[in-house]
Amino acid sequence: MSYAMAYGMEVYNIAIREGINLTAGGFSNMTNIIFRDALVETLYMGVLVILFSSLWGNRVGAAFAARHCDPESDNPYICRLLRQAGTVAIMCPTMSLAASILFNIIMAGAPLSQLPAIWVGTLLKNFPMAFFWNMFAAAPFTHWIFGKIFPDHK
């Protein structure tokens, strides 16, 4: 799911960087170039997502779900959604910080003193997309694909 999340977020951020959201028709004006460029950026940003989710993102998401959901008595689907929400709640700030450092400080040359403001702005831009992309696209798609590849033989 890490690469599905990274790819969706890269498409979103590249479209914004290219000003697609400001054109008449907004995101409906995206071109295939955006999807190609997002695929290239996902190659390295996806590695960061896997690293950070393995180090703390998945653990925090699991802890959040365990705190608010009992798999024995609650609907397993609700427990899964809570785990996804907890993971997004920690991974979005983490990846927004990584992207702020990489794209704004290192590549664009913004002063390091502006990092807190850049990070907050990046987080405000990315969190709504990350939450809904995870809940309604990346996670369901990943669960479906893995269900097809590894069918449950009960």
Image: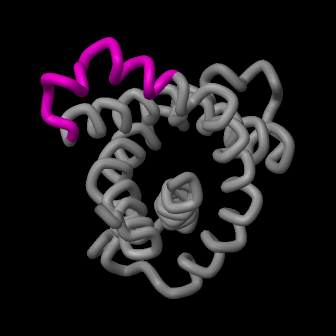
Report x, y in % for residue 81.
27, 38
Residue at far bottom of view: 32
Q: Which residue is drawn at 78% across and 19% down?
A: 113
Q: Is residue 64 magenta?
A: yes
Q: Is residue 107 magenta?
A: no
Q: Determine the image quadrant of residue 118.
A: top right
Q: Which of 76 and 65 is in front in this view?
A: 76
Report x, y in % for residue 144.
34, 67
Residue at far front of view: 154
Over which residues does the magenta segment extend? 60-76
Q: Residue at x 50, y 22 (%)?
A: 60
Q: Is residue 140 left or right of 123 when viewed as pictured?
A: left
Residue at far top of view: 67
Q: Which residue is drawn at 42% across and 62% down?
A: 142
Quarter the C terminus occupies: bottom left
Q: Nearer the viewer, residue 133 or 126?
A: 133
Q: Which of 45 and 34 is in front in this view?
A: 45
> Relative to 129, does residue 3 appear above or below in the rendering?
below
Question: Which colour assignment does the render follow?
Answer: one colour
Report x, y in % for residue 9.
50, 56
Q: Is residue 60 left or right of 52 when viewed as pictured?
A: left
Q: Determine the image quadrant of residue 146.
A: bottom left
Q: Which of 150 and 14 is in front in this view?
A: 150
Q: Is residue 48 left or right of 3 when viewed as pictured?
A: right
> Relative to 127, does residue 4 appear above or below in the rendering?
below
Q: Residue at x 51, y 35 (%)?
A: 92
Report x, y in % for residue 30.
43, 79
> Relative to 32, does residue 60 appear above or below in the rendering?
above
